[in-house]
Image (spheres, rainbow, N blue to C red):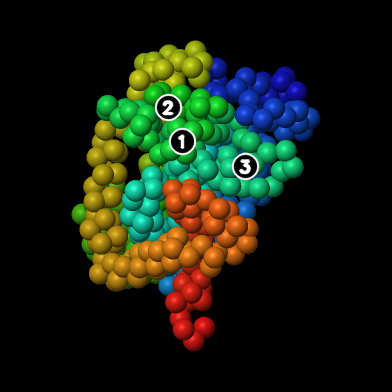
Amino acid sequence: MGEETWRNQALAPFATLPWQTRGRLHVEPGSPSRSPFQRDRDRIIHSTAFRRLKHKTQVFVYHEGDHYRTRLTHSLEVAQIARTICRVLRLDEDLGEAVALAHDLGHTPFGHAGEEALHAAMTGHGGFDHNAQTLRILTKLEERYAEFNGLNLTWETLEGAVKHNGPLLKQGRTLQQLPAAIVEYCQDHDLELGGHAGPEAQVAALSDDIAYNNHDIDDGLRAGLFEIADLMDLPLVGEMFSIVTQKYPGIDQARLIHEAVRRVINAMVEDVLAETRRRLKDAAPKSVADIRTLGRPVVAFSEHMAATDRTVKAFLYKRMYEHWRLNRSHSKARRVVADLFGLLFAEPNCLPSPWRERAEQAEPQARARLVADYIAGMTDRYALDEHRRLFDLYE
């Protein structure tokens, strides 16, 4: 596919233009049929880490129900929202999708409970950060190609994966305070950690917010952690449930939830589009470089929608993430991760090959990181099975 074909996609001048990519760390010939960002997206989808997201949960442990969101279904939903927003704003859809699909690759089993436990276990060894782990996966841990480790993605996709939530060097934060994986990679391939990412990565970040807020409402209702009546005082959410109830009296609950949630998603997407257009008009960027150096995000919620978003998050935190049933589940998950790390770090000969050979030869700091990589790559199911194999005397 030539440059002229890409131009005919009518990308905006401030989009991240694929024919102006900064390239890959390891130089590769271009593809005649796919843009650089299409190739990045395809490599992510075909990666082992992406397949594992099928059995990694966000809130519920995998065995608690087949219909709750997993990291995989969440990533697909984020990618769908990101493509829609990118298309309307004339940004590069493939780059927005690639960042959306990659953003959760570094998560541990058992969601944030697993990450908290692994970070605690890695105290004194550099800690654990899922964003840095995503970069490790994309640049080192995936072993698929003959000439390099990692997926060798473009600078722009890696920048988006690392900086989609904003600059890493901000509010006095120094390079020494960042995860070592990010600092080390940037020594060879500078991702410009002090600036904002391009607009497609900013779209992926907002799409993540839109997806998980609304889908956690859906999952929370399905799990019986709260009722529809509890949502009626929430801004936007309660309004949409009222509209659907009035328009379709007697509608069954499953349809009511879906109709209301899809309206909330649509309202949030339309708000992002309106606010982003306003900011683009004020900033008048002539290139993606202008967006990176603007000093603030160009893709954003309006002040009113941002306040609504914070209110919904506060509700979900109190009524869902801190629910006693989930606290019990997360407590068990943290113990599983802590047990696995403690044993495998102390006895690396219990690791399977080739992890065992690497860990036995490594200094303590490097061994801890290897064990963290091994555990972080586990699915919920594999972590529970591995814990049973290692700790159940009758297994």
Q: Viewed as shown, does residue 367 lie left or right of 323? A: right
Q: Nearer the viewer, residue 230 or 108?
A: 108
Q: Which residue is mark 3?
A: 150
Identified by mark 3, the residue type is Gly
Distance of label 3 from label 2 (alpha carbons): 20 Å
Instruction: Identify which residue is drawn at 71% across, 43% down.
Output: 145
Marks 3 and 2, the one that precedes in the sequence? 3
* Mark 2: secondary structure: loop
- Across and down, in percent, residue 62 comes to 47, 68
Residue at the bottom extreme of this rendering: 394
Distance of label 1 from label 2 (alpha carbons): 9 Å
Relative to 281, residue 202 above or below: below
Q: Quadrant of the N terminus?
A: top right
Badge 1 vs badge 2, beta-carbon distance below 8 Å = yes
Pointer 3 local density, CA inside 10 Å: few below 14, some 14–19, many at least 20? some
- Across and down, in percent, residue 119 comes to 36, 52
Q: Which residue is mark 2?
A: 193
Marks 1 and 3, the one that precedes in the sequence? 3
- Across and down, in percent, residue 197 comes to 45, 28
Which of the numbered marks, if any, corresponds to residue 48?
none
Question: Comparing marks 1 and 2, which lies closer to the viewer?
Answer: 1
* Mark 1: secondary structure: helix
Identified by mark 2, the residue type is Leu
Q: Viewed as shown, does residue 151 lie left or right of 68? A: right
Q: Which residue is mark 1?
A: 182
Distance of label 1 from label 3 (alpha carbons): 14 Å
